[in-house]
Amino acid sequence: MSSTSQPPAVPHPEPGKMCPACGRWRPSDTLTDSGRLRPGALREMITAFLAARPDEAFTATAISRHVERSSGAIANSLVALTKDSITKQVSDSPRRYQYIPPKGDAPASTPN
């Protein structure tokens, strides 16, 4: 009877750690091992940026300077975020977008 042994499972390295299997550096949770953003990461970065500044409107170029990603990719994400009612376009020229807080995030008014 022959026993086949499987190689030991290598745990996925933590962000900022070296991979024990291949020796590659894993830069962060937002990047894949090849250095590209993981799916949905740009959308999360844009949403977090806008949510931190809900009273301000930004162009794709202005956001790109803060998140250090392509303004074209950001413009495409802003269109999708607007369709999903996460942002709203507040001006046409230049196209500026503003975060729409979820209904549950509204500050509660307290009677005096």
Image: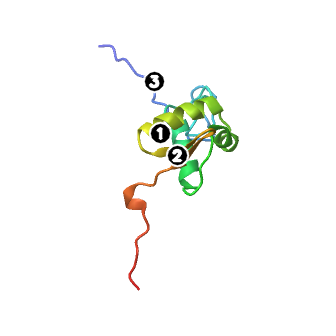
* Cα separation between marks 3 and 2: 41 Å
* Cα separation between marks 2 and 1: 8 Å
Residue tagged 1: 81
Q: In front: mark 3 or mark 2?
A: 2
Residue tagged 3: 7
- Expressed as whole percent of the image width and height from the top left, the position of residue 1 reads 29, 13
Residue drawn at 70 percent across, 41 percent down = 65
Q: Are marks 2 and 1 in contact (CB under 8 Å)?
A: yes
Task: Say whether disc 2 or disc 1 marks the residue closer to the N-terminus.
Answer: 2
Q: Tell me the crowding category of disc 1: few under 14, some 14 to 19, or many 20 or more residues within 10 angstroms, Cα based.
A: many
Q: 24 or 29, which is in the foreground?
A: 29
Q: 108 or 9, which is in the foreground?
A: 108
Identify the amino acid type marked 1.
Leu
Work out whether residue 19 can be spotted.
Answer: no
Element type at marker 2? Answer: helix
Q: Quadrant location of the C terminus?
A: bottom left
- Expressed as whole percent of the image width and height from the top left, the position of residue 87 reads 48, 45
Element type at marker 3? Answer: loop
Identify the amino acid type marked 2.
Thr
| Residue 106 drawn above or below residue 85 | below
Residue drawn at 59 percent across, 35 percent down = 74
Residue tagged 2: 47
Q: Tell me the crowding category of disc 2: few under 14, some 14 to 19, or many 20 or more residues within 10 angstroms, Cα based.
A: many
Task: Say whether disc 3 or disc 2 marks the residue closer to the N-terminus.
Answer: 3
Seen as rendered, the residue at the extreme right is 65
- Expressed as whole percent of the image width and height from the top left, the position of residue 89 reads 52, 43
Q: In front: mark 1 or mark 3?
A: 1
Image-based side of 5 in relation to 11, left or right: left
Identify the amino acid type marked 3.
Pro
